[in-house]
Every structure is written in C-alpha cells, then in structure tokens.
Image (tube, rainbow, N blue to C red):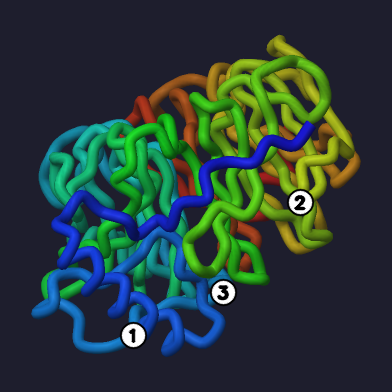
Amino acid sequence: MVEHGNSEPMWVLRVSRAEQVSRRRELGALLTAIAGGVAAACTLAPRAAVTGPVPWATVQVAGTPRWWGTVGRKGKGVGEFDTPSGVAIAPDGTVYVADAGNDRIAVINPEGVTTGTMGRSGRRPGALSFPAGVAIGAEGVAVVADSGNGRIQVLIPVAGGLGRALPGDDTPGHFAAPRALAISPEGTLLVADSRHHRIVTLGRDGTVTEAFGKRGTRPGEFDTPKGVAIAPDRSVIVADAANHRVQRVASDGTPIRVWGRRGTRVGEFQNPEAVAVELDGTVWVADTGNDRIQGFTPDGTPRWQWGHRGRSVEQLDAPSGLAIDATGALVIADANNHRIHRVGADDLRTSR
C-alpha cells in the first residue's frame, strides 16, 4: 500500500502574510533560475544573505579523501564529535558529518582535518537539534535531516566554514525524526521518516511526490527506518531498523526483496541504521547493534564483515552512518566512539 504524504511546499514558514507573499515571489524566481536542480526544503535566506541562485545539483559523485584510519574523539571542540550519526562525501573528498550530539554539521577536509562546522543548537532557521543525516549538493550545500526539530534544512557554507540556513519545513508533523537522506540522479530527495515508518520523496519544487510504507512487518512495511540509499538500478535500499532487516523496494515502494532477521550471525542484524550502495550493486549495512559493517551482493547474499565492538582502530561501537567514496572505501560514523573511520575497499573485502 502506498500512502501519500502532505504536499504542502517545504518553504512555507510562520511569518506574516505580506512576508509570505514576498517570499513566494522570490522562490518562484529562484526555481526558474535553478533550471533542473533539486529545490527540496529550500527558500531564500534573509535577503542580505543570498545574492543569487542557490547552488544545487541533481546528484553529487563522491570524491576521494586522502586520509585513512580514524578522525576525532568525544568533545565539543573543532575535530571532536558527540554521537556522529551520518556522513556524506563531496566531489572534492570533503567529508560532512552529522555531529548529532553537538547539534551541528562538521566539515573534514580531504586531508582529514576538521576545518569548521555549520549550524548551532536551537529551533530557528539554521539551528539544529540532533541532526541525524546529511547529503551534499553543489558547492558544499548541505541538506540536513534535522531530526530533533522534525524537518529538513539546507545549509550554505560561508567564510570560515560556518553555515547560513535556507529555512526548511517548519510545519508541525510534516516529518517525525527524519534520520537519513539520499539524492537521486533525477534530482529528487528521499527521506527516511523514521517515526512515521515511511520513506518520503520530495520533488524538485520541494513538495512531497511520494510517501510509501507504514508500520508493520510485511514486505514494504517498516518499523523505524533509519537508513536509505539509491541503487544503480534506481531501486531503494532501506535499513528497516526495528524490524532488524534490510529491504529493497521500487521507487514507488513496491517490495522487491527482504533480507536479514534479528540475530548475531552472518546476514543477521541488530537495529541496522545505515546503508550504502556501490556502483556494482554491492550493499553495505551498518549493523549498529552488532557493532559491525556487513557487505552483501545485490541479491542479499552476505559476503563480508568488518569490525567488532571496541575502541581500537579497527573496532566499532554502534556504527550509525555510511558513505562510499570514489575508490570504494567506506567512511563510517562510529557513533558511540565519537569518531569517523575511513576503511579501504581491499580491507573491507578481505575481512570476514
């Protein structure tokens, strides 16, 4: 069953009627100028902050960071994290981290140095509350699953590595703890709307074009989906966390394949919270409760494992975010160790 969500534009804000009219006119001009980019969850920032079209793209190909091993430790300073929950990689190899416990997005340059942060704690536009996921548009634009505030926001980098917000959806109830994001080659934005137990698709104008799933255990139903990725064949891979499984569904939510069950053996899961897909269709899963990463063939056959619980360089504690770079290496948000890993493709495939 396909359930359609609210189709209210993402740019509606709690402002005066005159200001709403003004912003709608500006948004219309903005969308015309973008010429095919994703416009999900965005409008003009305060007029002095934006001088031209928002830099955006349909999809960004991950670049290659030039560091290996781990980055970060627990804390609030630059280069420190508190429960990092999502990661994304820009074309130049910059890694963006949803630093959830610090209510910010951290920016790690290709050399592995944290150069700044975007966002701050709060509810106002540009402020974040437990950001759980991040995706990257053109020129460093960060689309953020602002989970604690129940909305999607867009942050534009400015001098010093900080960010300025394009206000996201401030309509109560539109999302409930959104956890992960994926941008399709066609320019739509997929959101794992975890507490509504569904996947929501936003079109280029920011409206809801599809919403599929409901709470349940049958194929095509979800219980607290926390990860989403788009496969090369345009199917959608979902980390169906509280059902302890992974699902592959069509873009309209039609079930294709389900794999996994609760457990600790190879191919079993405990609360998987993230997924990532390679160009050859290999699916990597953050098996969060089992403190490991599992790799599967496109048909769901388990092939590889990496990591186990601990604090050493090759150990994990509740991995919660995944991204694949241009070499096939995985970048992992190691949430309870408060750090980020980068693991090479060869290391992933030689472990079992």
User: For the residue carrying disc 1, how many other residues have a C-alpha within 10 Å: few (<14), some (14-19), or many (20+)?
Assistant: some
Marks 3/2 in contact by CB < 8 Å: the verdict is: no
Q: Residue at x 24, y 37 (%)?
A: 129
Residue 234 as seen in the image, left or right of residue 52? right
Q: Quadrant of the C terminus?
A: top right
Mark 3 element type: loop
Q: Residue at x 62, y 40 (%)?
A: 199
Q: Evaluate whether residue 19 shows in this view.
A: yes
Q: Evaluate whether residue 84 shows in this view.
A: no
Which image quadrant for residue 150?
top left
Q: Which residue is mark 3?
A: 58
Amino acid type of the residue tagged 2 in the rendering: Ser
Mark 2 element type: loop
Residue 298: x and y in percent read 86, 46
Tell me how far mark 1 sits from mark 2, CA to CA.
29 Å
Residue 120: x and y in percent read 14, 47
Amino acid type of the residue tagged 1 in the rendering: Pro
Amino acid type of the residue tagged 3 in the rendering: Thr
Between 244 and 153, the one lying in front of the other is 153
Tell me how far mark 3 sits from mark 1, CA to CA.
15 Å
Which image quadrant for residue 296?
top right
Residue 113 as seen in the image, left or right of residue 220? left
Mark 1 element type: loop
- Sequence order check: which comes first, mark 1 or mark 2? 1
Q: Which residue is mark 1?
A: 53
Image position of 116 with respect to 83: above or below: below
- Sequence order check: which comes first, mark 3 or mark 2? 3
Residue 334: x and y in percent read 42, 35
Q: Which residue is mark 2?
A: 251
